[in-house]
Image: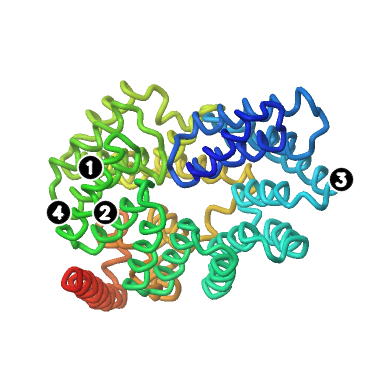
Amino acid sequence: MKAAEDLLKGALATDPDFLDAKSELAVNYLHQYETGLIGLDEAMTNCSAMTRQVLAVRPDDPMANALRIYVEIAGDAEATEPRRVYDAIDKLERLVAENPAVYQIRILLGQILQRVQQLDRALVVHLEALQKEPYNPRVHYELGTLYLLLDRPADARAALERSLELESQQPNAYVRLARVSSQLGDGVATVKHLLRAFEIDPRDHELPAGIALFLYGLGLVEEGDDFRSLVHAVAPTSEIAYLVDLRRAISMGDVSASVETARRIIEEDVEDRKGTYSEAVQQLMTVAAANGTIDETTTYLEQHAPGIFDIKADALPHKYRAAQIAALDAWYVSLPREELLRRLDDLLNEAQEFGLDPLADPGHRLGVYALRGETEAGVSLALEQVLPQPVTRNLLWREQYSQPMYADIVADERVRNALRSREAEYDLVRKQVRDYLAGISESA
């Protein structure tokens, strides 16, 4: 990504009026944000600057207008009104209809549709792009990413492998293949793909971070530390570096270190990239619930993030809304039942206003059943859909099911048996990954 940026800037240094290069540079900034090379504010500011320059000369430029629409939504740090999101979708759909050959507009449209969980509509858009650009690696990559969201790992793998056939040096495609492998329960393949991504782009600090997070999830702290050191050497104050430190502390059972890291995240107002901020809130509230200090922790959070728990707020930073969801575990312990259910319903209604279905994911639905005390439904869902999934899909399962809200569901003997089977699967994957990494070290 950085190399492409340098090439485009070189072209603009030679010809400052090269408008197509400015549009490509704007897209490049979006891609750099996707990979974590730059933050959201920097990406959107730079993208907007390039787009404005193009529109000043070519006000009807379709790609520049599409980028302007996209940035207005994706770059909004506050919770965007549903109407604005769907207005943006309508505008992008019109641009697609007027400019069917510009596949990049379809990609932007598909990404916005994915953001509001309109996955079937997004699939139509991406398949249309594929018809127009069958040999474009980016189109296959985006299609593979969508198939992951649709929980179609075999289709995702086929699309991503085709993308790599067309352009082999794509670290992000290998990261997506790692997600396919984790969906399918193959821990060794997950690590292989992540290592290959890092080999292609050793400057991207989020790649060793991804490896460290996976290894910490398996309790392989010593192995994970090798990659954590690479993250801290390149980007010690990045969002992902904080998340790596938090997960490391959790993996080691070091409550004090986890609280210290979580507090740094809150006090430095870190972006919620990869869920860093909301996970910090969750850890603080979980520890507070166990220690009986929820009131004190709530006061601390509200001092550093005014309005963070204001469920009724019309405009709220996205990370605050995510933090409210993360706090539900602790609220289950601390709030009167009527207030807990009111907050839960408000959050569900907020999601539904965007056209989202917060209960579509079985894991999320299980959490709602647990909060509402619908134990029988929760047990059935856990046994039929959640616990049969490969353990690599959720390496934080121990922490999740140890929360008080799941106690009645976990008390069912059938669920306890399923969790014992999950423990055995976890141990096997852990051993396989540890042996694989040991083999690499021996051959190096």
Q: Which residue is mark 4?
A: 252
Foreground mark, 4 or 1? 4
Which residue position is annotated with label 1?
A: 289
Q: How many angstroms separate mark 4 from mark 1 (CA)?
A: 20 Å
Inspect this view and state whether residue 327 appears.
Answer: no
Q: CA distance from mark 1 to mark 2?
A: 9 Å
Amino acid under label 3? Answer: Glu
Task: Name which residue lies at 40% across and 73% down.
Answer: 389
**Image location (x, y in percent) of residue 282:** 31, 43
Quick check: marks 1 and 2 in contact, CB under 8 Å?
yes
Q: Quadrant of residue 413?
A: bottom left
Above-or-below relation of 442 to 293: below
Kindly identify which residue carries mark 2.
404
In the rendered view of the protein, which quadrant contains the C terminus? bottom left
Disc 2 residue type? Answer: Pro
Badge 1 element: helix
